[in-house]
């Protein structure tokens, strides 16, 4: 059973889509047999100015992706890198145990997107 | 909100006529069928009358009908019961698309030292007769193949399988939990020696089932105790449940033919409509499937999300996705017919029932494409 907040983010996911010419992009998961989350970020003066995501997966994957974008928007990239799977799950009012293993992918995708941006800066 | 139940393979509602029939057996005729007094005799009479009704529906004799707690128990009793009785013939042949009640029982026996052959199926879910024949050895004691698959609805060639088992002196068990009440299930036409039935798939109550055991089949009881059901299944008989199951059988004997035709029409309309959705396909055979079963896969989405989006619109359905099953792997049936895990994860099963109308089908056909479009808009692949 999912929490009310999970169901809300599942029914109305926030920040869905793709950012053209994103400053960073990160994709995690396994398209062959599991969930996939992709996050796009726009960074200005070290701040995550815009963030969007796409997801193929179960309600938990959709909700965690959505919640990750909400938590990260407007934060510094250091703050973004510190957002954890646990933070996302907590903000959603908890996830079924199994879902934490296979579907809590938003934070990893966010970190990958920020690292992609940092790599491009070098 | 409009609510449309299209998950009748999971369970059915209890027909109100069945409920009516059952009620007095909770309150008035509550006796223990083993008791000598009036109350006991009354219960016993109802029990035996129910046995006759079920026997007639199967083309069997009442002595060959054993009441159990449901399909799972019937499968366990059939398979373990037959295998435990024969010390020499220690080989079972089954298929990889059986219900877990059969598969897990076979797995358990395998751990206990029995040999099990799991037959593969083709892309539509059919067991190959040649493959079955090739798998028979002198040690084969039992073949257990379902009459129709619970996920994709494929109807197996049980009659033909029965010819092979007969020729080789092997017992044939079939799990008829999904097929009973929807397609003809005469044990002599089907050439079967054992057959499992469940009450709650035929508009009867949960917690009651039947195992048909052909006269002369050597079988050991699995549950021991007071010797109920001629020693085959100890435990005070669930008289209200049994009466309910029998009433459900009585009802479908009158209504089945017409109802199955109606369901087939609805099913085919549903299939035609859903397949108009881009990147969708039907799992199983177009016609050799249960009249009420439709199973689809859709690219670029995940089944649990699809089910919960449908649920939000008032439509109850199910999926073979890993996410919904509580395991890491998607449906063993869908992967057995050659679907990739990704395709199996994007599956949807709609199973129709007596209360579904053409309006319900139209409603699904209106709502489903929008949901699929929406989930695909989200999709990262």
Image (cartoon, grey):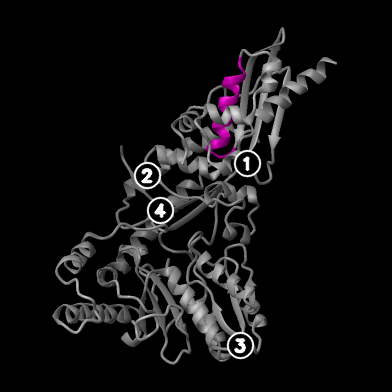
Residue position marked by numbered label 2 in the rendering: B362
User: Start and end of the magenta stretch?
Assistant: A57-73
Q: In this view, does B112 lie above or below A67?
A: below
User: What's the distance in space between the residues labelled 3 and 2, CA to CA?
Assistant: 53 Å
Residue position marked by numbered label 1 in the rendering: A101
Question: Is there one chain holding both mark 1 and mark 2?
Answer: no
Front residue of B69/B147: it is B69
Residue position marked by numbered label 3 in the rendering: B89
User: What's the distance in space between the residues labelled 4 and 1, CA to CA?
Assistant: 29 Å
User: What's the distance in space between the residues labelled 1 and 3, CA to CA?
Assistant: 44 Å
Q: Where is residue B276 in the image (x, y as percent from the top left)?
A: 51, 44
Would residue B312 be seen by someone viewing this image from the given angle?
yes
- Figure label count: 4
Q: Mark 3 lies on which chain?
A: B
- Secondary structure at badge 3 equals loop
Residue position marked by numbered label 4 in the rendering: B7
The residue sitting at 56% across, 26% down in the picture is A66
Q: Name the image quarter holding residue B378.
A: top right
- Secondary structure at badge 4 equals loop
């Amino acid at each position: 059973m999912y929490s009310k907040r999970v169901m809300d983010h599942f029914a109305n996911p926030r920040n869905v889509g793709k950012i053209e010419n994103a400053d960073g992009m990160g994709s995690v998961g396994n398209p062959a047999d599991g969930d996939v989350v992709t996050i796009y970020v726009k960074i200005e003066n070290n701040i995550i100015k815009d963030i969007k995501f796409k997801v193929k997966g179960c309600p938990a994957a959709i909700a965690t992706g959505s919640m990750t974008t909400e938590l990260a928007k407007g934060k510094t990239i250091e703050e973004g890198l510190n957002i954890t799977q646990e933070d996302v799950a907590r903000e959603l009012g908890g996830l079924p145990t199994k879902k934490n293993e296979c579907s809590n992918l938003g934070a990893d995708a966010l970190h990958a997107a920020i690292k992609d941006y940092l790599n491009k800066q070098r | 909100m409009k609510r449309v139940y299209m998950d009748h393979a999971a369970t059915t509602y209890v027909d109100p006529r069945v409920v009516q029939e059952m009620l007095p057996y909770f309150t008035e005729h509550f006796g223990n069928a083993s008791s000598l007094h009036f109350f006991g005799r009354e219960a016993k009479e109802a029990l035996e009358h129910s046995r006759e009704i079920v026997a007639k529906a199967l083309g069997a004799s009442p002595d060959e009908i054993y009441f159990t707690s449901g399909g799972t128990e019937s499968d366990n009793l059939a398979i373990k019961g037959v295998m435990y009785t024969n010390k020499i013939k220690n080989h079972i042949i089954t298929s990889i698309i059986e219900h877990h009640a059969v598969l897990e029982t076979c797995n358990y026996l395998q751990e206990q030292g029995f040999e099990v052959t799991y037959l593969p199926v083709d892309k539509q879910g059919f067991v190959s007769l040649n493959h079955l024949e090739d798998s028979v050895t002198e040690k084969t004691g039992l073949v257990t193949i379902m009459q129709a698959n619970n996920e994709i609805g494929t109807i197996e060639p049980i009659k033909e399988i029965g010819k092979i088992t007969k020729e080789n002196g092997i017992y044939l068990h079939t799990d008829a939990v999904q097929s009973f009440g929807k397609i003809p299930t005469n044990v002599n036409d089907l050439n079967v020696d054992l057959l499992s039935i469940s009450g709650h798939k035929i508009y009867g109550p949960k917690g009651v089932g039947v195992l048909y055991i052909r006269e002369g089949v050597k079988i050991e009881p699995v549950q021991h105790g007071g010797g109920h059901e001629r020693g085959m299944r100890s435990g005070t008989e669930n008289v209200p449940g049994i009466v309910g199951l029998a009433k459900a059988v009585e009802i479908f004997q009158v209504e089945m033919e017409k109802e199955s035709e109606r369901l087939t029409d609805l099913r085919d309309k549903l299939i035609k409509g859903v397949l108009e959705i881009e990147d969708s396909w039907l799992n199983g055979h177009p016609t050799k499937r249960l009249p009420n079963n439709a199973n689809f896969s859709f690219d670029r989405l995940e089944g649990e999300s699809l089910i919960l989006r449908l649920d939000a619109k008032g439509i109850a359905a199910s999926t073979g996705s890993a996410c919904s099953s509580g395991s890491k792997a998607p449906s063993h049936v869908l992967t057995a017919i050659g679907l990739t895990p990704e395709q199996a994860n994007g599956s949807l099963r709609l199973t129709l029932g007596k209360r579904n109308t053409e309006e319900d089908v139209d409603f699904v056909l209106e709502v489903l494409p929008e949901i699929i479009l929406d989930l695909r808009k989200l999709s990262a692949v």
